């Protein structure tokens, strides 16, 4: 039994593993996480809005209805604007919460380990909701762990038997029929009422219907959202890597502007070959393509570092003083990859997949590991 699962669910962790995970449409609710997660609940930012907004280093967004009754999400807010919106009764979300509260990063790591998830599959966000304001009936394209931090809110939850494993978020509730603490007229028949307060944990599988209604005080809750890769994700990665090797599929397609007559002859000829390319995929190549994408996404270049690559060696230096920090002996054939990494954007290496579709995951992992040890790369998690 994983330690983090027990911290979140207590004695209901075994029930979660046997009856919910990985793909059953069933929720789990547990109490007592406050005592099991003292590092999280003792953090001064966990329930103090002023401290939280001052310390938060990730993106901030707000959600609600505009004057025409249309649901809107506004992102890119600063702390001052978010605070003002909350005073006017608009709920606010603080993304990448692990950057503000270290205990959340530990929760992410532990949950990934307990569930066997790849890196970069968990997003952490803190929802701050004014009194009496919730979110209308909807489902998400991710699994969600909801931890109450401060205040109380009622969630109405129900299985989704209409859309298995949705790849999108869908909001169908109406403001005129919003849920209250005692009733949820827009929810499916048989919806269950769950009240989440400090130390309570609610697990909702991907696609599960839910609607919330806050109490008479502001409510803080932490959501750990699990973006698990689907079979479609894996197959598209592998097919893309395969087609990138073929010049015909890299050729720009002309004549797509509005009002232009598009010739489909060349496209039709290429599409005729797609079934053959798909048939050539095997489980090993599909998993390798996903592993390479994950490796590149999970690392970034350390600020203030440069990498100079020679024929048989590379040197990591600090900028701007040029002090040599580490020397690297190159494996045969890895110099082109290292040169591309040296020119990569400091926040992402994902574009390198397009340049090197033939580099397998173990080789790429070895290259990145050496660069981490040389203090040129760091984890992007």
Image: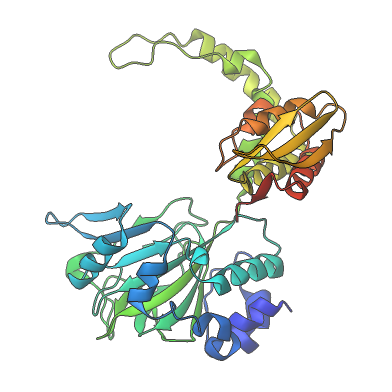
Q: Residue at x 48, y 61 (%)?
A: 96
The residue closer to the viewer here, 52 or 288, is 52
Q: In this picture, is 55 found above or below 70? A: below
Q: Quick one: quadrant of the N terminus? A: bottom right
* Relative side of 33 to 318, left or right: left
Question: Is any atom of residue 300 visible in this view?
Answer: yes
In which image quadrant can residue 73 be found? bottom left
* Relative side of 206 to 60, left or right: right
Q: In this picture, is 105 found above or below 246? A: below
Question: Is any atom of residue 357 visible in this view?
Answer: no
How far across and down, in percent of the image, does residue 252 sit?
50, 14
Q: Quick one: quadrant of the C terminus? A: bottom right
Q: In this picture, is 333 found above or below 265? A: below
* Relative side of 285 to 33, left or right: right
How far across and down, in percent of the image, does residue 63 sit?
28, 60
How far across and down, in percent of the image, does residue 203 sit?
52, 74
In which image quadrant can residue 193 be found? bottom left
How far across and down, in percent of the image, does residue 5 sit?
64, 77
């Amino acid at each position: 039994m994983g330690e983090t699962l027990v911290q979140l669910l207590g004695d209901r962790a075994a029930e979660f593993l046997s009856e919910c995970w990985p793909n059953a449409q069933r929720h789990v609710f547990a109490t007592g996480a406050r005592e099991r997660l003292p590092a999280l609940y003792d953090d001064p930012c966990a329930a103090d809005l002023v401290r939280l907004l001052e310390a938060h280093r990730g993106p901030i967004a707000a959600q609600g209805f505009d004057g025409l009754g249309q649901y809107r999400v506004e992102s890119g807010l600063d702390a001052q604007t978010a605070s003002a919106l909350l005073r006017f009764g608009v709920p606010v979300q603080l993304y990448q919460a692990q950057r503000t509260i270290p205990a959340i990063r530990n929760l992410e790591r532990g949950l990934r380990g307990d569930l066997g998830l790849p890196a970069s599959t968990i997003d952490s966000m803190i929802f701050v909701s004014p009194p009496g304001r919730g979110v209308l009936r909807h489902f998400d394209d991710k699994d969600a762990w909801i931890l109450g931090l401060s205040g109380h809110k009622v969630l109405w939850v129900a299985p989704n038997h209409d859309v298995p494993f949705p790849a999108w978020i869908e909001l169908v509730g109406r403001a005129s029929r919003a849920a209250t603490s005692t009733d949820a007229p827009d929810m499916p028949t048989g919806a269950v009422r769950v009240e989440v307060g400090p130390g309570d944990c609610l697990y909702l599988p991907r696609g599960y219907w839910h609607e919330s209604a806050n109490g008479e005080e502001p409510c803080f809750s932490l959501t750990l959202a699990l973006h698990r890769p689907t079979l479609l994700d894996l197959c598209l990665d592998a097919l893309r890597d395969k087609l990138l090797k073929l010049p015909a599929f890299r050729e720009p397609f002309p004549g797509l502007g509005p009002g232009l007559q598009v010739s489909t002859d060349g496209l039709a000829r290429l599409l005729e070959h797609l079934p053959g390319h798909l048939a050539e995929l095997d489980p090993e190549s599909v998993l390798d393509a996903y592993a390479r994408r994950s490796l590149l996404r999970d690392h970034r270049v350390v600020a203030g570092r440069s990498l100079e690559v020679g024929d048989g060696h590379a040197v990591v230096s600090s900028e701007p003083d040029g002090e040599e920090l580490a020397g690297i002996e190159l494996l045969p054939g890895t110099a082109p990859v290292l040169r591309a990494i040296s020119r990569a954007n400091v926040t992402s290496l994902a574009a390198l997949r397009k340049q090197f579709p033939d580099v397998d995951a173990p080789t790429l992992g070895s290259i990145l590991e050496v660069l981490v040890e040389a203090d040129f790369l760091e984890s992007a998690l």
